[in-house]
Structure formats: structure tokens, C-alpha cells
Amino acid sequence: MNNRHIIIEEQGLRDGFQTLSKTIPTQKKLDYINQLVNAGVKRIQVASFVHPRLVPQMADAEELCKQLVKKSDVIYSGLVLNVKGVERGIAARLNHLSCSISASDTHSQKNARLTLSEAKKAFRNMVNLSKQNNITVRGGIQCAFGCRYEGSIDENHVLDMVDHHLDTGIDELALADSTGMGNPKQLGNLMQKVVEKAGNIPVVLHLHNTENKGYANLYAAIEAGVQIFDTAFGGLGGCPFIKNATGNIATEDSVHMIHQMGYKTGIDINKIAEISRELETTIGNKLPGQLYQLLNNKDIKMN
């Protein structure tokens, strides 16, 4: 048995819910958060601080954070794309913010209305403001493995952005396959270089399963030394600014695979599957994940 611990950050409340047409009430979101904590999840991204007109599901970000039941062993985080978002995150009393910009200039302009050069300057300002307020900062690079608008993203460009992010004093470094275009060989090679560059800075990987390569990429990243992964219960998610980029890798599917490989997460996949089934009933649609459906069979037991 491998004693290496893999950390999961749940993205369903943010990346998952932002794509839903049906609004999830704040109290229902709080119920899901409590269920996730009860299932052993120690890191949850609860909201993004973006304009509610662009992402209506996040309109209650401040109210949700206000009502969170804080626990010493659970990290609640928020996504921010600009200084205004950081200011809102500070006001919401979150201690962990994910400051993220894109490796693609076109995606950056569509997602944040900033050129890549402008985004880099804004990123440094976001990090500085966060650190001044004693907030732990995760520095993110979106579209690190490909962009629907620009195609492939040069590896050296991504590594330059890694250097840029590390130079700002971030506490964690995250790369995102926002479009699901990455493949295991490409992703594994790049992540190995990123892990080496990062040194003592923890490296996070955010995977989408748009092209059905998400779990192969998860395996490649684990082999490359990555220990923190973003997932979403039921496989919810996608970028609202990238057409058809739906589906993070599912929490229960990912954790099951990780456990089968001999690693530990501390997460109960049966409890996660219950959350996914509950959401399926709430929104009236099947979710992209596979395991939550299989685990509905009471005769089947997994861990």
C-alpha cells in the first residue's frame, strides 16, 4: 500500500454550479458544503467573486461566505479574476483565494477583458493585496494545455508564466486544463517540469474531462508528482466563456481511482455519490460522472 496522500479540492460549488441554468438557493449550497465536509473533503472552493450578470449562480457569494460554519481543518476558498474580486473576497472573510489568469491572450480577453500583458500586471496586484491581508494565495494558470480559440499553447510560454507566478510570492501554484485538450504524455511531461520548478510550493492541477482524457491525465499527473487535484462531485463544471467545455473530472470517480492505485484521500466516495444523486434530482438532469450512478445499486460497495 502506498502511503502517499492525495489532496482533493472540491469545485462543484463554484465551477460546477456556475454552468447550471437552475439557481441553487444559498441554504441548499450550505447543505451541500456540510455534506462534503461530512464525506471527508478538507478543501472546498465555495464561490467566485465575479459580476453576477455574467455568472448569476455566484450572485450570493458574500451571503454564502457569511453563513459558512468555519472548521479548523477545512479550507474554504474563492476564485478571483481581478482586484475587485480580491476586495470582495477579503470582505467575505475568506482566508484562501485563488487568483487566476489565462495562458491564452484570446481567452484572457473573453474571460477577464484583459490582454495577457495586462492580466500579468493585474495578477501581481491581486497577490499583493491578498498577502497584505494575510490571505493564502493560490496562483492559477488557465488554458495551460490548450485553448479553443488559439489551439495549442507553447510549453515554454507556460513555464515562463510559472516563473512569473512564483516570483509574486504565491503559496500554491495551479495549472488548469480549462478546455480538456491536454493529453497524458504532454501533460505529464509539463507537470514534471512544473513540480521541479515549484520546489517547496505545492502544485495543483485542475482537470476537465471534455475530451474524455481527464482520468488518464489525472494518472499522468500523479506519476509526475502532483499531489493536489481539483474535482467536482458528479463531474459538474465547465467555463462559461468556452463553448462546450463542460465537465470537471468527477470527485467520486477520481477518488475511487486514486484509492485503487493505493493512495489515500480520506474521502468517502459513497457519501459523495449521495450528494451527486441529490443534485441530479434537484436539477432534473443526469450528471457527467459515472460512479454516482453505479453506487446507487445497494449491492455494490466501493471505497
Image (spheres, rainbow, N blue to C red):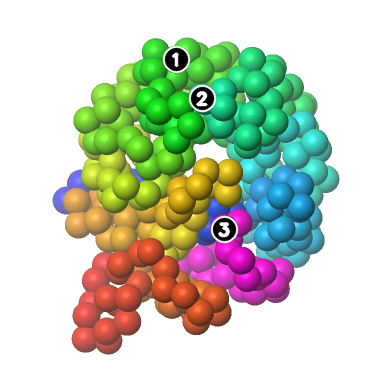
For mark 1, does the 10 Å Cα neighbourhood hold few (<14), some (14 to 19), or many (20 or more) residues?
few
Q: Is residue 132 left or right of residue 162?
A: right
Q: Which of marks 1 and 2 is nearer the N terminus?
A: 2
Does residue 18 show up magenta in the picture?
yes
Residue that mark 2 sits on: 103
- Position of residue 176 relative to residue 265, above or below, is above
Residue that mark 1 sits on: 157
Q: Which of marks 2 and 3 is nearer the N terminus?
A: 3
Q: Which residue is drawn at 41% across and 60% down?
A: 235
Amino acid type at circle 1 is: His
Amino acid type at circle 2 is: Ala
Numbered range of the magenta stretch: 17-40
- Residue 102 image-quadrant placement: top right
Residue that mark 3 sits on: 19
- Position of residue 303 relative to residue 106, above or below, is below
Q: Earlier in the sequence, mark 3 or mark 1?
A: 3
- Residue 61 image-quadrant placement: bottom right
Q: Residue at x 58, y 49 (%)?
A: 240
Picture coordinates of residue 41 (x, y %)?
47, 59
Amino acid type at circle 3 is: Thr
For mark 2, does the 10 Å Cα neighbourhood hold few (<14), some (14 to 19), or many (20 or more) residues?
many
- Position of residue 18 relative to residue 151, above or below, is below
- Whether residue 75 is visible: no
Total marks drawn?
Answer: 3
Q: Which residue is drawn at 28% across and 46% down?
A: 213
Picture coordinates of residue 40 (x, y %)?
45, 63
Q: Is mark 2 on a helix, strand or loop?
A: loop
